[in-house]
Amino acid sequence: MATVLVATSGSDEPTGPKELTSDQANRLAVTRFRNYQAGGRAVTIKVPGTAGELVVTGSIDYRGKVGYGAVHGTGRDTSSDGLIQWTATTVSVHPMTSAPKKAPARPPASGWYSRPLQKYGSSLDSSLTIALKLGNDRPDNAELLPQNGAAWVGQDRLNGQQVDIMTGPKAARATAGPSGEAAVRYWIGSDGTMYRVRVGVASAPEPVVIDFGTHTYVPVRKVPGLTPKR
């Protein structure tokens, strides 16, 4: 993955890093493919900021390469609240003074403002980009992952599921964020299902947390006139 990811556990203390077993490497190799196989996943994206946190609650269509959800500020003003839909190149926002907790299944037909997705300098846009890249139409190479620095670092329980925490390969690393960490960490179930990714971006004071399966997945309907560019 081109964007750098950083992660830590929210509840446990990692006991690794340790070399991946063949089973762990296989699960890490298929975890993004699992999201693609599912078609889409329900996601909650928490983006920290100096003025407070932004929370995106919605769905990502990993085959159509588009995400959609409701945005709320926590510990900050409501100027960013509303609806959001994004692709790899475009972010469309629908400001709302009283945004719903969950985005309506059918996006409003009007009231949207579109802009190019920023590749640098925006914690929100970096988080949206990373979330879209957590699906892939083929598995990664399980044999190359350990060779390239992927490792097992601990275990946790999320949503009643026992998960292993694994770092991604060194190729997915870059400058550490303010937290000082420098690798993606995935929380992965026994069948390779992705339950959480925690990512650090240079423009955010703390790592971003992307949780999967936090609510019921609702298929993404594209905003009228918005066509994703692949």
Image (cartoon, rainbow, N blue to C red):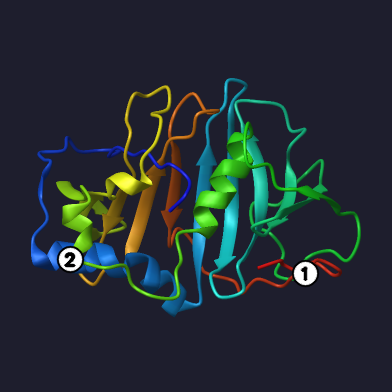
Q: Residue at x 44, y 69 (%)?
A: 136
Where's residue 106, x and y in %?
A: 76, 70
Where's residue 172, x and y in %?
A: 37, 47
Disc 1: which residue: 227
| Secondary element at tag 2 | loop
Depicted 48 relative to depicted 196: above or below: above
Disc 2: which residue: 143
Can residue 52 be seen here? yes
| Secondary element at tag 1 | loop
Where's residue 115, x and y in %?
A: 80, 48
> Marks 1 and 2: which is nearer the front?
2
Q: Residue at x 68, y 59 (%)?
A: 103
Left or right of 200? Residue 112 is right
Where's residue 101, x and y in %?
A: 64, 51
Contact flag, marks 1 and 2 (Cβ < 8 Å): no
Depicted 168 relative to depicted 179: above or below: below
Q: Nearer the viewer, residue 5 or 205?
A: 5
Can residue 163 be seen here? no
Q: Nearer the viewer, residue 147 or 217?
A: 147
